Image (cartoon, rainbow, N blue to C red):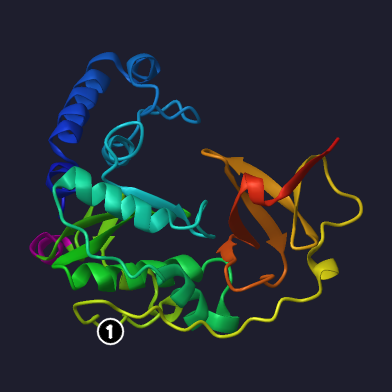
Amino acid sequence: MADVDTLAAVALNEQGRRILAEASAHLARVGPEQFGGQYPDLADDFSDDAPSPIMLLLGVGQAPYPVTIGWCDWSGEDDPGQVRYFVDTACRHLGLTPPVWDSGTEDRVISELAAGIKAGVYVPALLSDIDAQLRAAGLRLLMIDTDSDTYHFVPVTAAAFGILDGTEGDGYTLGSVASLGSAAIVPPTPPRAAGPVAEPEQPPVEAAPAVAWAAPQARRPGLYARHLDAEYEFVPAPHGRGTLRAYGPPPGPQWRPDGWAWVLEVATGDVELFLIH
């Protein structure tokens, strides 16, 4: 049995544990109806019930509080590198030293999955690879399973992982990435030797003719971009960047899965933008 306090000791930093204690005390004092007035980010707007202890802990471990618990939808990353970003940020807030990441992690996982890649498969495979890299640095990725369509995870020391792996609490189970289902997981990446490592050679990917990836004639209103003589839906992002979105097979080797679509991050200045009303 792993109660919330036991999990909080490794999943939250000192500030997070203080916020969790204060929020829990406030909830017990005022009840669920008034709780959201002081803690709108932790209240459940879709339920009249009070948030459960595990949901409070997950909320405190995520933005706008110090991020120590990462999350990712089962279907894919919202943005390329989302999982590694969360693990890096969590390590920093928890006082852990993350590994020196293989910069080609996401591309390698896509390559290893090859034709088997689809929604629901990529994220467990990526988590498995990241766990293997953490293991080489004396850390592990602890999964917090709440039986939802979102993966929650936190980097912990190998010692803490050994204590918590396989335990459960009220509304959650703690375990390894392997508990997500071994059939969907790429075998752990072999330990990498110290020193400079050559980038893995990517298999050639032949992009289909541009017309195959162009947006349909009856396009829904929104922002679009022209890239390499094809047109794609475009989602702006901060700092002069954005994301192209394509459906069907990936148009090229640099595209990443995102649910049932493929996305490519580009600089706004590198594409021609236009608006469909």
Q: Is residue 185 left or right of residue 140?
A: right
Residue 8 in view in this figure = yes
**Quadrant of image for the C terminus:** top right
Q: Position of residue 17 (x, y in %)?
A: 16, 34
Q: What's the residue at 24%, 24% (across, down)?
A: 23
In the foreground, 6 or 41: 41
Q: Is residue 274 left or right of residue 90?
A: right
Q: Position of residue 267 (x, y in %)?
A: 59, 49
**Quadrant of image for the N terminus:** bottom left
Q: Is residue 43 magenta?
A: no
Q: What's the residue at 39%, 50% (across, down)?
A: 71
Q: What's the residue at 45%, 65% (across, down)?
A: 123
Residue 170 in view in this figure = no
Q: Amino acid at mark 1?
A: Pro
Residue, far front: 269
Task: Give above or below for 202 relative to 240.
Answer: below
- Label 1: few (<14), some or many (≥20) within 10 Å? few
In the foreground, 226 or 4: 226
Q: Is residue 62 left or right of residue 91?
A: right
Q: Quadrant of residue 117?
A: bottom right
Q: Position of residue 217 (x, y in %)?
A: 91, 54
Task: Check disc 1 and report the residue beneath it.
Answer: 190
Q: Position of residue 6 (x, y in %)?
A: 12, 47
In the foreground, 99 or 75: 99
Q: Where does the magenta region start and end?
A: 159-164
